[in-house]
Image: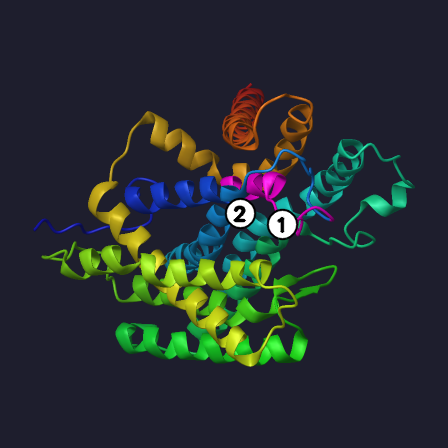
Amino acid sequence: MTTQAQSVTAKNRIHWLDNLRMVIIALVVLYHVGGVYETTGMWAFFWIVDDPDTWMASGIIGIMFDTFVMPTIFLISGYLAAASIKGKTAWNFIKGKAKRLLLPWVLALVTLIPLYKVIFLYSRGLPQENWTTYFHITNPNSQNWLWFLPLLFVFNLIYLGIDRLGIKLEKVNLVWGLIVGFLLSVGFSYLMGNIAGFRSWTLTPVLDFENERLLAHFLFYLFGAAAFKQDIFARLPEKKTLYNIANGLSWLPVTGHIFVRLWPFFVPGFEVTPLYRILWFTSFHLSSIVLAYVMVESFRFYLNKSGKLWELLNRNSYGVYILHVVLIGIFGTLLLGVGLPGWAKYLILFILTFIGSNLLVSLYRQGKSLLSIKERKQLNN
């Protein structure tokens, strides 16, 4: 066993963590591409493009991704927040997170959200509307995919309070924390499902979040922070026994959740019962924990590597997240009239969106770098 003493700095990156974040964002892109070709029609009324050439498997793939993609992102975010808060004043931490999260969010709200509606209407052959309806405050879809940014900022503020109060996350037993967190998440989801409506969202001008998953997302964030505090990623486990068991059995809760999600479409007159909600949330949260664990350990064991392509994709991943939905709209609209089956369009749209987003982000980064060099030369002169 090789000890891997690691810290999150520019000179000593945790390569597997960077790689995991990039791949998870790629899966977010794939998940959103699936919304263009899903067969149930549940995305049709709000998603940027609705292609009549559908592919049933895209919906099933989306259900699987839905269980672990955002929990894993929140876990990574909590780990990085705990790393970045060390040695900083509260104000410097807040300023850094505001610059990282809120500034891109505001810029995207006034540019990408209006463009989203332009593409939404155009792709459906509908006339454009009054310009005042193109902004998120007047848009019934609110912030759409950008909801993650302000919610993560709030989580960072809460963590700042936890840190300043001296609450010792390094003393938390992570095994018991997972068990209690799972039970709390299921109970909270069931309670919110009854109060706010099954699978419901709170949409406001500032914060959007899915009511039933709010606590689970925050607990994953806290688990990531505790993982940093306890330095549990400092060395690889001596044995892969737990990883192999989780890897071999992960299909059970995931298959169960897929079955629960699809069951109403095959039962005429289906009604949501308390038992159905319990099965939904139990299978969902269990899948989230198991798959997030499998993803983390898989990257630790097998993808703790670096290289020019990895580094490029990792640097671009945050920008790809912000831009990708608009590119899905542009390329998805162009593919509407192409005589290909849904599965082929699904793959083509993902490739075009992922490559196109990375190219745009790379061009932006190069332009910014050239501008910075020019400004330094002017100051030196």
Which quadrant would the C terminus be assigned to in this image? top right
The residue most toward the front is 268
Q: Amino acid at mark 2?
A: Gly
Residues 363 and 31: in front is 31
Residue 279 visible in rendering = yes
Direction from residue 277 to residue 288 in the image, left or right: left
- Which of 164/78 is in front? 78
Q: What element does badge 2 sit on? A: helix
Asked if the stretch drawn in magenta spans residue 39, the answer is: yes
From the image, tell me which residue sits under label 2.
59
Coloring basis for residues: rainbow
The numbered disc on residue 275 is: none
Nearer-N-terminus badge (2/1) = 1
Q: Is residue 114 above or below residue 70?
A: above
Does 55 appear above or below 139?
above
Task: Report, in whole angstroms, how far the alpha carbon at label 2 lies from the one at label 1.
Answer: 8 Å
Q: Is residue 134 left or right of residue 255?
A: right
Q: Nearer the viewer, residue 332 or 149?
A: 332
Q: Is residue 214 above or below residue 108?
A: below
| Displayed quadrant of residue 356 | top right
Left or right: where does residue 176 sit relative to residue 359?
left
Q: Which residues are magenta?
A: 29-45
Tell me residue 73's x, y (percent). 44, 53
Q: Is residue 14 visible?
A: no
- Place residue 37 in its image quadrant: top right
Please state which amino acid type lies under the numbered disc 1.
Answer: Thr
Are the residues flagged by discs 2 and 1 in contact, CB closer than 8 Å?
yes
Residue at which label 1 appears: 40
The residue sitting at 42% across, 67% down in the picture is 283
Q: What percent of the width, then of the height, locates residue 290?
A: 33, 61
Classify mark 2: residues with Cα within 10 Å, few (<14), some (14-19) or many (20+).
Answer: many
